[in-house]
Every structure is written in structure tokens, then in C-alpha cells.
Amino acid sequence: MGIISTGCLLLIVLLSPTTSKVLPISEEDQLLYESFARKGVEKFNQQSNDAYRWELDRAWEVERSLSGGIHYSIFVTLVKMDCTKQQKRETCKKTDTLKKCLVEISRRVKRHGYGLKDVAHVRNCEEEFTRNIEKFNHRNIKLEHGNSITVQELRKAKIIKPRDYVIWNSFLDFIDRHDKQYDDKHEVLKRFRVFKKNAKVIRELQKNEQGSAVYGFTKFSDMTTREFKETMLPYQWEEPVYPMDQADFEKEGVTITEDDLPESFDWREKGAVTQVKNQGNCGSCWAFSTTGNVEGAWFLAKNKLVSLSEQELVDCDSVDQGCNGGLPSNAYKEIIRMGGLEPENAYPYDGRGETCHLVRKDIAVYINGSVELPHDEVQLQKWLVTKGPISIGLNANTLQFYRHGVVHPFKIFCEPFMLNHGVLIVGYGKEGRKPYWIVKNSWGPTWGEKGYFRLYRGKNVCGVQELATSSLIN
Ligand SMILES: *[C@@H]1O[C@H](CO)[C@@H](O)[C@H](O)[C@H]1NC(C)=O
């Protein structure tokens, strides 16, 4: 048997294409993949901290790849049992609680002798959910104008296929969690299809992640990647309209050497960073990136943290384009022209372009100049620890589905010359052997790591060093 399998393995290696695809499991393969998956679940029960036993509910989809053996990724649902791992298995019953996981199986030819060895483990488990079918059927989806529709009504239309069950559950949780409201049934179904497609995008990102980032459903999960780019990243960052001065480190008092740089550093701990803000459905990231830098520079110069108005920049900066995009390098010059920035509460944010209603006497903060920083991440560290948070341009394509961890995609997923988002570096550190930047985003505190993300440091990942700038305050 062992020998036959080995021969078969070789045949597969020779005949199969090297690219792999996630495929639904056919009825005849169900038993095979479920027996594979159970090996992973057994190990999961031995290793997890959970007191309760979990068993395989069902294997749904599989992806096969061939590299140094056969490798299966089996997408499964696990079901929680009503007994602990210590209790006898025979007495256990299934509960209504499920979770989605991935079981990884590597089949390798045994090093000595014949036969195959399977190594199985469970990973990427998502949050638990209930399968109580009554509850599921009666879940209400709110629509515009006080209307609503139940899942059962959608099921009647045969729109929910049995194998979509798990993803529907995730979609309903997403609607609840983010308080989504759609116009009508068609919009619900359209958004569901987008959501389902995004699940594949997420898997693809995860598979190609070199850092520790975990991708998953976020509040942007019902937008296609294209809609996301058009709304949140509408602007390709080009050369600034105003050319910028290069930073003179010596003149600005940045004298620290590379050897003296601390291992880790975080301006949030020193009170130089305001709370995480939310740009909404408006391409005004550039304004948030700019105010973040000025807030920090003002804190360092005057020892006072003032939250500043992005709306003033959206409305009154006549070089940039409000919700359609802009650049911090232009915004600094405009801040000088206007005489400064009003505080957030004097000129609050509403995420739409308005006519400028700047009140000069309310201006709280001024700047005296601005500079472009070297395209060198060590130089950026030196500036950061001495002068405060840094405004940067970034390729933010992979951030639509970022949950947590250190982002490090392959270059093709995040070209360093395609900058489309403005954010703020507030610190840096190291996770094991992975150096990272701590970056403040403007997508609200529920996104990412409480509104922040971490980005691999030292390899110009996603163009982090390409357009770093700072204001100067005397
Ligand atoms: C910085 O700018 C402010 C406001 O425009 C101005 O009052 C101040 O004199 C400037 N400082 C220097 C040293 O140029």
C-alpha cells in the first residue's frame, strides 16, 4: 500500500499543475478529506487551551499544492462538544457552537523506508458562531425605510445554498457588528456576493503574507477591492505641486547616531499623539496624515497636545482636492498661507467638502516650514525619536482586510512606487526577529490594532520611505 501510494504521489507531482485553487469538496471525496481533517482536530484538542472538546463538523473546501510533498489546506467547521477534554468521548454531545478553521495537512514520503507521513495542524480559527437554524432563519436584516427581510425569506429564493451557510453566518455577524444597512433585498444579495468574493481575496493575502499580519473581515468587507480604492484611496500620490526642501538634520538638531537609537520607541506613551480619528467615506487621508504630524511637532515645540482640524484642510486648502485626495507636502504650504490650523472642536470634521469657513482668531497652531525626509528608514528613525511623528505616503492596498500583526506582503501585492494613502509613523519596535513601524491610520479605532497597524521595517515595504515629510515649528 505504501509503495503504491508513493508511486501515486510521484504521478501527481508529474501531472498536476503547480498553481493551486480552492475547490469545493465533492461528495465522493468527502470521507477522505474528513479523515484527514480529523487528524488535525485531534492534535488541536491536545494542544489548545480550550477546556472543551471540539470535533469536526464538516469539511467544505480544499486547496492542494505541491512543494516538497503534497500539501492540503482543508476549510472546515468544527463543532464544540458539551464535555471537557478529560471526560469520556462517548458521553459527549454536539452543541450549537461552531467555528471555521483551516486544517493544514502535509504528506511527505517517510525519510527511512516506505510509506507516507501526514503532518496535520489546525490554524486560522475564526470567532465562534451558532448554528441554531431557527435563530439563523429568523435573523432580521434591516433595510432602508424601516423595512427588513429575514434570512428565511432569502433562503426561500434558494439564494442561500447549503454550502454558503458558513459564509452567510459570517456575513450576518458582519452586518450586526458594523451596523450595516442596505437599501433592499438586491443590495443585500449583491453585498453578500462581494463579501463572499472577498473571503477568497483574504485567503490569497494570507497565503502570501511574509510577516505576522492576519487578514480577515473588516468593516470594508462588503466593498469590492475596486470600490475600496475608489473611495478610500482615490489619489495616486505624484510629485508635490510645490517642490520641497530636503531636511537638514544637523540644523534641526537631529544628531543621534544609529548606535544610540533605542530598540523600540512609541510617541503615544509620551503624549504626543491624539486619539485615532475616522476619515469616513472621504479620501482625506492626506489631511489626517498632515495634522498628525503637526500635532506631534507642536507637542514637541510647545509641550502641549492640541487635536487639529482636518476639515479646515479639506475645505480651505486650495491646492489639494479635499475628499478627492491631496498631499501633505502641499498641505504644509497651505497651512502657512492660511496662518495655521484651528483646533478640531472649533472646525469639526464632517467628511464632506464644504465652503471654507476659517476663523483666523480661532487658529491655535502655526508652522514655520516643512521638509522632505531622506528615503532611508534608519534616517527616519533618527528623525522620529528627535522631532516627533512622521507623515508618510504608503501603498495601502492590503490594508482593506488587515486585522492585526506586522504587515509584510510580497512586493507585487504592494508596489513601493504606487503610493495611495497618507498615514503617520508614531513609533517602532521589534516582534521576535521582525522589525516594525507603528503606524496611525485614520479609519477609526475599530479598524486594525485599535486604529493602528504595524508595518515591516527596513525593506521599504509598501513604499514606507518614499514620501516621508514633516512640518517645522520654531
Ligand atoms: C513662525 O511662524 C509664526 C506664525 O507665522 C511667527 O509668528 C513666528 O515668528 C515664526 N517663527 C520664526 C522663528 O520664524
Image (cartoon, helix red, strand yellow):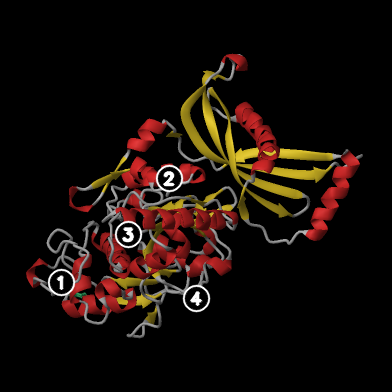
Pair 4/1: label in front: 1
Q: CA distance from mark 4 to mark 3?
A: 21 Å
Pair 4/2: label in front: 2
Q: Residues within 10 Å of mark 2 (few under 14, many from 20)?
A: many
- Labelled pair 3, 1 in contact (Cβ < 8 Å): no
Q: CA distance from mark 1 to mark 2?
A: 39 Å
Say which residue appears at 25% left-offset and 50% top-offset. Answer: 143
Q: Please name the residue that numbered disc 1 is placed on.
A: 354
Q: Please name the residue that numbered disc 2 is placed on.
A: 168
Mark 4 vs ligand 1: CB below 8 Å: no
Q: Taking the image as four quarters, which one is ligand 1 found in?
A: bottom left
**Picture coordinates of residue 363 (x, y %)?**
13, 68
- In primary-sequence order, the first of circles 1 and 2 is 2
Q: Is residue 368 visible?
A: no
Q: Is residue 337 visible?
A: yes
Q: Please name the residue that numbered disc 3 is placed on.
A: 442
Q: Which mark is residue 417?
A: 4
Q: Is residue 146 above or below residue 370?
A: above
Say which residue appears at 80% left-offset and 54% top-offset. Answer: 12
Amino acid type at mark 2: Trp
